[in-house]
Each structure stands twice: as structure tokens, then as C-alpha cells.
Amino acid sequence: MAKKLILFIFILQFSGCSFIFYQPDRVLYSRPEQFKVEYKEEWIEASDGTRLHSWYLKNKAGLKKPKGLFVFFHGNAQNLSSHYANLVWLTSHGYDVFIFDYRGYGLNDGQPNQQGVHKDALAAFDHAHKLFKKIGHKKLIAYGQSLGGNIMARAFIDFPHKEDIDLLIFDSTFSSYQDIAIQKLKKFKLTYVLSPLAYILIDDRYGSYKHLSKIKRPALIIHGMRDLVVEPEHGKYIYENIGSEQKWFWPVLGGRHIDVYHKHEKRYRKKLLKFLE
């Protein structure tokens, strides 16, 4: 047992714990054509020159002035070709969706890490903002799901055009890398004893919890009350500590991790559309 613990500590220390938070792959799960959605494949560039693959999904009605543009910060596993399915349904209701991959995901080069994905998120914010200004969407909405919610919130702090973001949506997300790592380590006998070491081994410089009070734009927090991946206490913490004067918390009764739009008789799709209007 002692040898296993030492090996685990060694792996944590020298991997930067990236395997806990980033689990990318290069599988092409599907394309928007399968949903009969017109889209544009684009490459954007982070400040350090890393090229990032993205899809710009266009609303099915072909509106010249779409109801809004969602910039989608996806979760930790797979790549954009699986995650876009969570919001593609919005294109049937007059909304465009812009989704991108972090470095190391899908077609992108590099290895994901907190500093790198922060740069990627800022590049996505910048590109979406340019689309918003060029096309004239009625709203610009930032959507962060699971890991993407923390990445979105931290990047928002450094984004120079905050006032143009109409709404931030946090779906099944957290605000501290250390806190979520501790919870996961405590779930297994082998790693339970190591959980306090997360404060030493896990980098939390890009944890958004330090900056939540600085976020003043309207915010919607959605969390499944039976989420076993990111426990609902994390969503409640964001709601209680975010600095927005206008903020809402939607507890999804019986909801699990990021299932809000695919289950529950899809009533949350209607609820979101009504909320946006």
C-alpha cells in the first residue's frame, strides 16, 4: 500500500494533475449535418499562437439578426464533436452557437493545462464578440458546462468587453480545482488519505472562486440535485458568491450531470427559451 501511495503522489506531482481535469480525445463523434444544421468550420488563434478548431452553428431559420449568439465552453472529456449536441437544439429557435476546442482536444495541437486553456477561452470570447458585432445578434450569451463553467468565469474576468455579455450560464460547474479534486480523492480508499495533499499538488491559480464577486453581469446557475460528478453544493456556492445583481439558481430535481436538456421531458428547453425572451 505504501508503495502505491508513493507512486500516486509521484504521478500527481509530475503530471501537474492534468489527467484529473482534462480528458481529451480525437474521435469525430458527429457533425452538425446530422442535425440538419448549417455551420462554418473556423480556426482561431490563442495569444501564444496555438490554433484552435471551432464550429459556428447557424440558426435554422436563417435570420439575418439572430436572437442571440451562444459561446459554448464545453466540459473536460472528448471534444467539440460530442459536446455541441448539448446546445444544437437552440439553432431551431433562432440562436447561433459558437463552440471551440481547447488545446490538445480534437484537431488541436498542444497539451491542456490551466494557463493554456485560459488563453484559449479568451481567444474564444474575442472571436465570439467579433461575430456578435459583425452579425448583430440581439444577445451575446456565454455558456459554461462542467469544467467549462470554471474556465469561462475565469476568462470573463480578463475579457475586455464584459459589458457586451448579456448573460452568463453556469451548467453543472464548479469554481475551485482544489475543492473538486479533494472530493474525488475522498471517494476511493486508496486516495482518501491523500486528499489533503490536493492543497499542495493542485494548482488553483485559475480557480474562479477568487473572482466571483467581480462578476457583475446577469448570471443563471443550473445544477442537477443528483449530480454525482460535480455535486450541487458547487453550483450553490457560485450562486451565493457571484457579484451579479441579477442572478438565478435553477435546481434540477432528479437531475444528474449535464442532463438538463436531454431528460426531464425536455421542459428545461422551454424554460430556457422563455427565460431568454
Image (cartoon, rainbow, N blue to C red):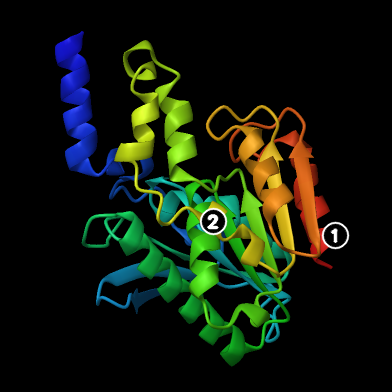
| Residue 149 in the image: above or below residue 48 | above
| Farthest-out residue, bottom | 134
Q: Residue at x 50, y 45 (%)?
A: 176
The number of numbered discs placed on residues in the rendered structure image is 2
Question: In which quadrant is the N terminus drawn?
Answer: top left
| Residue 88 in the image: above or below residue 52 | above
Kindly state the secondary structure of the residue where label 1 is placed. Answer: helix
Q: Residue at x 73, y 81 (%)?
A: 138
Which quadrant of the figure has residue 77? top left
Which quadrant of the figure has residue 141? bottom right
Mark 2: amino acid: Lys
The answer to whether marks 2 and 1 mark residues whose Cβ atoms lie closer than 8 Å is: no
The residue pinned by badge 1 equals 274
Q: Is residue 166 left or right of residue 103?
A: right
The residue pinned by badge 2 equals 210
Q: Circle 2: is it few (<14), some (14-19), or many (20+) Cα within 10 Å?
A: some
Kindly state the secondary structure of the residue where label 2 is placed. Answer: helix
Taking depth in this image into account, of 274 and 197 the one nearest to the observer is: 197
Q: Residue at x 44, y 30 (%)?
A: 182
Residue 199 locus on image (x, y percent) = 38, 37
Q: Is residue 97 left or right of residue 101?
A: right
Q: State how far apart marks 2 and 1 are (Cα).
A: 32 Å
Q: Circle 1: is it few (<14), some (14-19), or many (20+) Cα within 10 Å?
A: few
Residue 139 locus on image (x, y percent) = 71, 77
Mark 1: amino acid: Lys
Taking depth in this image into account, of 273 and 61 the one nearest to the observer is: 273
Q: Residue at x 66, y 58 (%)?
A: 169
Which quadrant of the figure has residue 6? top left
Taking depth in this image into account, of 116 and 205 the one nearest to the observer is: 205
Q: Is residue 77 left or right of residue 274?
A: left
- For marks 2 and 1 on the same chain, the one whose residue lies earlier in the sequence: 2
